[in-house]
C-alpha cells in the first residue's frame, strides 16, 4: 500500500490525498432544433458560452445564458420556450436584463409548463439569437422508466471533454447529474498544465477572487462538448471542493493559505459560491450558513432524487491523521451538518411513505468503507472520516426498512460498484448480498487523472482492492467517461461508458461494465 499512501504536494502527510486515490445519434427532432453537431457547438458572438437549463420541476425549469461583451448598463434579453423544435408553439416568454454585477449571466425560471415532456428554448439580444436549447420537465404520477447520465471531475488542462460530447449525442436522458468538480481552482502546472493541447488554465494563477472564479467558469464553458451537453439536456448539479478549493470544509480548505496572500476563507468561499450560482442553471437558496445546494426532485412515483452538500454547508474539518480513530469518532463531527442530516432523514422517510420506488442520493465523496489491509481508513476526507454521519443513514435504512437506496458518487476519479453495509467483514455475505442496506455507484472522471498513471499498476491495484474489500463488486482505475443509470419498477441498471481517449477530440466510447439492482434486493449483480 506504499504507493497509494503517497501524499499530495499541499496535503497533510498523514492523510491520503483524494487526487491520488483517486453509436447513438440525436433524434430527428433534436437535429431540427440544433442543426448538426458542429452547428450546435458554434455559438453566436453574443452567446459565446451557449445556453443551459437545470433544476427542472413538473411545471418549470431554469433557463440560463450569458451575454458576451455586455454593456456596463446591462443588456435586455428576450427569451421564449416552446413545445416544438422550430419554436413556433411558444408557451411562455419575456424579457430580462443581463446585468454586469451578475457577470452578464441570465437565469429565468420558466413556468407554466406541462409535466414530463420535452421543451425548446431560445434567447435573443440586440438582434442576435442564441442556439436553441432542449430541456425536460419532471414527470408526475406513474412513470415506467427514467435514465440519467452521471458525471464528475472535469479538469480542463488534463484533456478534452469527450464524455460531455457523448452525453450531448444521447437523446434518451431525463437529466444530467453533475456531482461536483465542475471546475478546478489550480494555477497552470499545479495540477495539470494543458499548454501542449491549448488548455492551460486561465487566469494563469490559482483562483481566489470573484473575478478569478468567473474567468475560470467562462474558460470551462468555452469547451464545445460541455456547451453541447448543457444545450441538449437539463442538468442537476452540486458542487464538490474544487469549485472553491481542494478538500474544503465549512470553515476552510486544505488548499487555502491566508498567509500566502489568499485572503480569508469566508471571502473566498463567498466568491466561489457566487460565481457558481451565476454560471450554473441552478435555483438559488440562501441559509443561515451560506448558499444551499442540497435539495430534492421527485420523478413521479418511480424516483426521488436527493442531492447533498458534503462540502461547504456543515462539514467538520478533516482529521489529519488517518490512524486517529478517536478523533474521527469525536462527538459532534459531521460531514453534512445537523440540519442537513435531519432534512435527509425526513426526505428518506417521506419518500418511503409516499411510495416512491427508488431513492437516488447524489453526493460527492465515497460513502462505502475504503480501508487498507490492516483495516485502517485510507482517506479521512471521505465518509470513512465521519463514521457517525454514515451510521445515522444506515441505521435509518435498517430501522425504517427503506429499500432501493442508490448512492451516486463522484470525486475519486475512478469507477466503483459497491454494496453498502455497516461492516463489510461482519454480518455481510458477498456471495448473496445479504446484509447490504443500499448500493453505491461511483462515476469515473471526465478527465481528471485516476489513482495510478501507469496502466499496469492500476490493474494491479484494481485486483488488490477486489480481493481486499468484500463489498466491492467492480472497479476501474484506468479510464474516463460517465455513468448511465436506468430505472424501471423492477430494476436499476448502471452502465459505465468509457471514452476512447482524452488526448484529442474523439467520438469513440465503449461499455466497460453493466450492473443491476433488483427491486428490494439492496445489492448489486451483473446485468
Image (spheres, rainbow, N blue to C red):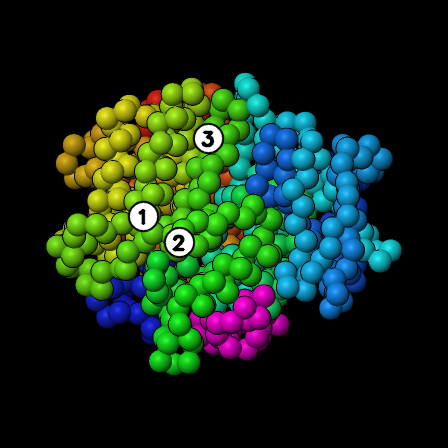
Q: Which mark is residue 289?
A: 2
Q: Is residue 511 above or below residue 478?
A: above
Q: Report the number of discs.
A: 3
CB under 8 Å between callouts 2 and 3?
no
- Is the C-beta separation of discs 2 and 1 under 8 Å? yes
Between the residue at mark 2 and the residue at mark 3, the CA separation in whole angstroms equals: 26 Å
Q: In the rendered view, does 13 fall on the left or right side of 458?
A: left
Q: Residues within 10 Å of mark 1 (few under 14, many from 20)?
A: many
Q: Main secondary structure of the magenta part?
A: loop
Q: Secondary structure at mark 1?
A: loop
Where is residue 503 shown, x and y percent of the image?
56, 64
Q: Which residue is mark 3?
A: 304
- Residue under label 1, please give it: 337
Q: Where is residue 89 drawn, in percent x and y? A: 82, 32
The magenta segment is: 186-214
Q: Is residue 455 above or below residue 134?
A: below
Q: Which mark is residue 103?
A: none
> Of tags 2 and 3, which is closer to the observer?
2
**Quadrant showing the C terminus:** top left
Amino acid at each position: 500500500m506504499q504507493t497509494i499512501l503517497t501524499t499530495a504536494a499541499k496535503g497533510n502527510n498523514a492523510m491520503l490525498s483524494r487526487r491520488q486515490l483517486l453509436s447513438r445519434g440525436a433524434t430527428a427532432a433534436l437535429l431540427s432544433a440544433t442543426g448538426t453537431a458542429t452547428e450546435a457547438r458554434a455559438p453566436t458572438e453574443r452567446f459565446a458560452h451557449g445556453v443551459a437549463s437545470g433544476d427542472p420541476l413538473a411545471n418549470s425549469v431554469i433557463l440560463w445564458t450569458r451575454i458576451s461583451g455586455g454593456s456596463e448598463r446591462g443588456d435586455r434579453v428576450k427569451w421564449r420556450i416552446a413545445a416544438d423544435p422550430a419554436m413556433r408553439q411558444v408557451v411562455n416568454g419575456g424579457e430580462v436584463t443581463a446585468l454586469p454585477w451578475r457577470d452578464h449571466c441570465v437565469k429565468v425560471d420558466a413556468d407554466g409548463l406541462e409535466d414530463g415532456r420535452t421543451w425548446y428554448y431560445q434567447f435573443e439580444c440586440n438582434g442576435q439569437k442564441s442556439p436553441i436549447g432542449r430541456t425536460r420537465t419532471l414527470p408526475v404520477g406513474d412513470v415506467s422508466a427514467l435514465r440519467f447520465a452521471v458525471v464528475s471531475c472535469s479538469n480542463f488542462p488534463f484533456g478534452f471533454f469527450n464524455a460531455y460530447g457523448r452525453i450531448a449525442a444521447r437523446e434518451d436522458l431525463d437529466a444530467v447529474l453533475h456531482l461536483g468538480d465542475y471546475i478546478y481552482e489550480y494555477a497552470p502546472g499545479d495540477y495539470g498544465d494543458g499548454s501542449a493541447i491549448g488548455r492551460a488554465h486561465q487566469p494563469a494563477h490559482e483562483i481566489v477572487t470573484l473575478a478569478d472564479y468567473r474567468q475560470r467558469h467562462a474558460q470551462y464553458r468555452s469547451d464545445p462538448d460541455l456547451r453541447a451537453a448543457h444545450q441538449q439536456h437539463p442538468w442537476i448539479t452540486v458542487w464538490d471542493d474544487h469549485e472553491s478549493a481542494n478538500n474544503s470544509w465549512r470553515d476552510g480548505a486544505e488548499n487555502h493559505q491566508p498567509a500566502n496572500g489568499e485572503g480569508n476563507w469566508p471571502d473566498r468561499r463567498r466568491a466561489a459560491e457566487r460565481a457558481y450560482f451565476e454560471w450554473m442553471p441552478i435555483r438559488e437558496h440562501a441559509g443561515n450558513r451560506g448558499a444551499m445546494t442540497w435539495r430534492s426532485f421527485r420523478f413521479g412515483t418511480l424516483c426521488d432524487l436527493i442531492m447533498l452538500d458534503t462540502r461547504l454547508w456543515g462539514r467538520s474539518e478533516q482529521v489529519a491523521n488517518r490512524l486517529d480513530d478517536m478523533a474521527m469518532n469525536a462527538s459532534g463531527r459531521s460531514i453534512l451538518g445537523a440540519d442537513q442530516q435531519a432534512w435527509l432523514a425526513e426526505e428518506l422517510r417521506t419518500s418511503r411513505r409516499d411510495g416512491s420506488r427508488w431513492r437516488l442520493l447524489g453526493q460527492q465523496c465515497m460513502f462505502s468503507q475504503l480501508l487498507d489491509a490492516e483495516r485502517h481508513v485510507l482517506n479521512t476526507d471521505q465518509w470513512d472520516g465521519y463514521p457517525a454521519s454514515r451510521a445515522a443513514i444506515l441505521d435509518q435504512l435498517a430501522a425504517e426498512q427503506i429499500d432501493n437506496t442508490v448512492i451516486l458518487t463522484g470525486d475519486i476519479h475512478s469507477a466503483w460498484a459497491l454494496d453498502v453495509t455497516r461492516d463489510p467483514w461482519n454480518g455481510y455475505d458477498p456471495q448473496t448480498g445479504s446484509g447490504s442496506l443500499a448500493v453505491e455507484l461511483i462515476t469515473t472522471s471526465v478527465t481528471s487523472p485516476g489513482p495510478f498513471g501507469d496502466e499496469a499498476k492500476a490493474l494491479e491495484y484494481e485486483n488488490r482492492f477486489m480481493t481486499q474489500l468484500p463489498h466491492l463488486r467492480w472497479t476501474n482505475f484506468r479510464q474516463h467517461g460517465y455513468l448511465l443509470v436506468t430505472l424501471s419498477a423492477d430494476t436499476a441498471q448502471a452502465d459505465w461508458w468509457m471514452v476512447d481517449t482524452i488526448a484529442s477530440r474523439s467520438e469513440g466510447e465503449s461499455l466497460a461494465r453493466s450492473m443491476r439492482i433488483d427491486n428490494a434486493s439492496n445489492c448489486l449483480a451483473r446485468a
